Amino acid sequence: MRTERMTILLSPASKAAVSARAAAQGLSVGEYVRRKIEDEEDLSPEQEAELAALVDEVNAAVPKMAQSLDDMIQTLRRTREKVERSLQQGAA
């Protein structure tokens, strides 16, 4: 197979993202890019719609999850304060 070299310009952030994706799959950057170029599987309209619906669900869930985490943090802080008071009273 005859090959030719191709040079592309990317921002540092884009280069880092491509490098990280390649490394995550255990591939060289060149192999990762070749596979991505050769991958001609486009999503069907149904798949696109399903992904859009999933994105909407995730976007709706994130604020609720953040609030739950904030609530848990407050509960942990209150619990830690109670434990510290109990330990101080026990030591006195």
Image (cartoon, rainbow, N blue to C red):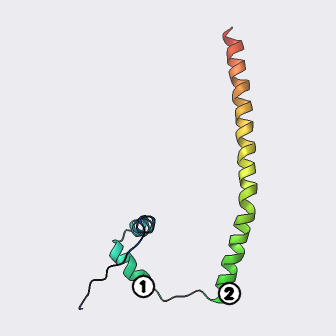
Expressed as whole percent of the image width and height from the top left, the position of residue 84 reads 68, 22
Q: Secondary structure at mark 2?
A: helix
CA gap between label 2 and label 1 equals 23 Å
> Residue flagged by tag 1: what amino acid is it?
Ile
Disc 1 target residue: 37
User: In which quadrant will I find the N terminus?
Assistant: bottom left
Expressed as whole percent of the image width and height from the top left, the position of residue 2 reads 23, 91
Q: Residue at x 72, y 19 (%)?
A: 86
Q: Secondary structure at mark 1?
A: helix
Q: Residue at x 45, y 64 (%)?
A: 13
Depth check: 29 or 84 in front?
29
* Vertical placement of residue 11 versus 66, above or below: below
Disc 2 target residue: 46
Q: Residue at x 76, y 55 (%)?
A: 64
Q: Residues within 10 Å of mark 2 (few under 14, many from 20)?
A: few
Q: Which residue extends farthest top?
A: 92
